[in-house]
Amino acid sequence: MKTILNAPDAVPPLPAFSHATVCNGMVYVSGSIGCDKSYKIVGDIKEQTRASVENLRKVLQAAGSDLEHIVKANVYLTNMNDFPLMSEAYLEYFPGKPPARTCIGVAALPLGASVEIECIAEKP
């Protein structure tokens, strides 16, 4: 059985999205860009990465999970030259052993964002 989740503390999803789907003990979190609740993109690549991960945290917590339960993350960057700075900010949230991760260069992201992150986490 799957459950569609919208987290009240997270950036509101656009009408065509939900924050996450919970199914068979796993949480599949939609992509999150680095913006505030009014959809304003925040700062540089590091600030956008932090905002994206913080939003993922809020969604995961609403699902009964958290960042330490992420098993796979996908990162999308509009400029692969931002990879080192994105990784630096990303790793602040995953001391020790970070989850498996893929990083993909893309032509554009919603609202002109530089980074978008999605993840799959277990629900303990």
Image: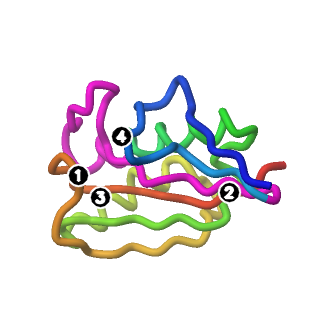
Please give the residue where the numbered disc 4 appears in the rendered image: 14
Q: Quadrant of residue 96?
A: bottom right
Location of the N terminus (image quadrant): bottom right
Q: Earlier in the sequence, mark 4 or mark 3?
A: 4
From what the image shows, is residue 89 above or below residue 58?
A: below
User: From which residue to which does the magenta span run?
Assistant: 24-49
CA gap between label 1 and label 2 equals 23 Å
From what the image shows, is residue 43 above or below residue 80?
A: above
Please give the residue where the numbered disc 3 appears in the rendered image: 85
Q: Nearer the viewer, residue 97 or 120?
A: 120
CA gap between label 4 and label 3 equals 27 Å
Q: Earlier in the sequence, mark 1 or mark 2?
A: 1
Q: Is residue 65 left or right of residue 46?
A: right
CA gap between label 3 and label 2 equals 24 Å
Can you tell which of label 4 and label 3 is closer to the viewer? Answer: 4
Q: Earlier in the sequence, mark 3 or mark 1?
A: 3
Question: Callout 4 environment at 10 Å: few (<14), some (14 to 19), or many (20+)?
Answer: few
Residue type for callout 4: Leu
Q: In terms of secondary structure, where does tag 2 sit?
A: strand
Q: Residue at x 70, y 39 (%)?
A: 63
CA gap between label 3 and label 1 equals 20 Å
Please give the residue where the numbered disc 1 appears in the rendered image: 110
